[in-house]
Image (cartoon, coloured by chain):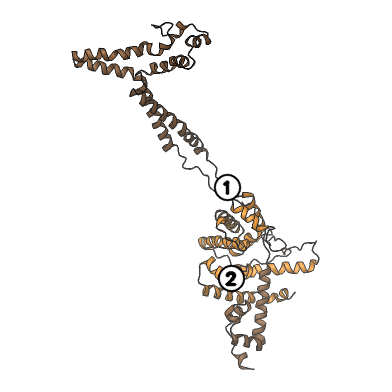
Chain colours: A brown, B orange
Amino acid sequence: MSMTTRAHPDPERLAALAGADPDALSDRELIAHVAECAACDGQVRDLRALRAALAELPDLTPSRPLRLLPPVPQPTESAGWRIGLRRAFAPLAVAGMVLLLVGGVGATGALGPADAGAFFQRIQFSAPAALEAATGQPEESAADVGMAPDEVASPEGSRGQTGAIATDFPRAADASAAPAESLVEVTAGEDTSRDGDLAMVEDRAGWILAALAGVGLLALALVLRRTAVPIDRVSSGR
Amino acid sequence: MSDSDRSRPATRTGPLAEEAAVVAAAARGDRSAFTQLMEHYQGACYGLAWRLLGDPDLAADATQDAFIHAYDHIKAYRGGVFRSWLLRITANASYDILRRSQRRPTTALPEPEEGEADIADPRAVNPVAETARAELYRALDAALRLLPEDQRVAVVLADVYGMDYQEVAESIQSPIGTVKSRIHRGRLRLRVLLADQRELFEG
């Protein structure tokens, strides 16, 4: 019995050699011993055969059908109506901003007549005047639409004077006349000034209401935005 | 262990045809491409999970966890063998379940019953050889289940699924020296457990 046979290496070193561990493969003493020792050589052969068999173990068929993909995120029922409400945010916000803008500008008088109704009527009645300016044929504009010139004019005046219709509108005329009256009344005392302010507010009530409606719509849109965000939008689970 | 637990495809799953293109499509969010990959590799992943956990339901859970993780992280896949990448994910998912459950399923060896052995495919070229091979696989799986958990996990990852020391160490979050020791001791113990069935290895 040789020295190498008596001094068997640690079995774990043999297992490492069987597994082609780089450290074991570079161990000359271990390699030399295995080459001379039939018992250790047999053990390494067994371990190599074992590894080869383990490497052949086949795949297995799952015991039950597996879900191969995570579920597609779906809105839960509770979140569905909240998402619907949330979608109303954009149109409400846009409508609110438009109303606020138009109402605000109108209330400051930048659009001309203080009264919203008068403003829209002026736009309507200015159309024939613009047509006349463009064509130079004052009578055709009315005739073309099948109306007598006096039908186009305002109820109270300027019959047949289509070109002057816009400036002859009674409310506008009243408004243009107002400064003169106000001048007289201001000198009469403060009460008349308050009446004038009140009258101005009444005249511009339409614009103010429009602006307030815009603010309301904006507020509603913001409330929807904050409260209707679906928290449990995604359904999880296997 | 029921027959369905041990039902096996004939061989190990190889790479999918044009796998790189399918993986690229899956990384772009193509769910059908991802499904194709998972269908192809589900046997490999389930087999690994089953051998690590020793329980069919837990193995199915681990495999599905691995698929979900793979779906979420496939954009981070940086090439290499896709099967190995997926198996590492499966190993991590299985080991997570193992640690959570703290199970020790190796106390009892399920004794083979009469007639329970895998039935060889009658269409096989050599039914006798196929039967012997099926018996070998069954003996190996039974012996693996008898290993202590730490050794079984290390041997399965290294010797059954071909991971190197570094990959095993990362999967089970242990030092490489510890991993080597577990693998070597596991091999030696398996040899002892299978000493009476050496004829199976010689066929």
Q: Position of residue B200 (x, y in %)?
A: 72, 73
Q: Residue furthest front?
A: A136
Q: Amino acid at mark 2?
A: Asp
Foreground mark, 1 or 2, reads: 2
Chain letter of the residue beneath label 2 in the structure image = B
For residue A7, above or below residue B76: below
Chain letter of the residue beneath label 1 in the structure image = A
Q: Nearer the viewer, residue A132 or B143?
A: A132
- Secondary element at tag 2: loop
For residue B198, above or below residue B43: below
Say which residue label 1 marks.
Answer: A71
State how far apart marks 1 and 2 are (Cα): 34 Å
Say which residue label 2 marks.
Answer: B164
Q: Nearer the viewer, residue B168 or A190?
A: A190
User: Residue A171 falls in which quadrant of the image?
Assistant: top left
User: Residue B139 falls in which quadrant of the image?
Assistant: bottom right
Q: Position of residue B193 (x, y in %)?
A: 64, 74
Q: Nearer the viewer, residue A131 or A59?
A: A131
**Mark 2, other Cα within 10 Å: few <14 / some 14–19 / many ≥20:** some
Q: Nearer the viewer, residue A214 or B74?
A: A214
Looking at the rendered image, the quarter that the C terminus of chain B falls into is bottom right
Question: Residue at point 38% right, 13% down?
Answer: A167
Q: Position of residue A175 (x, y in %)?
A: 32, 14
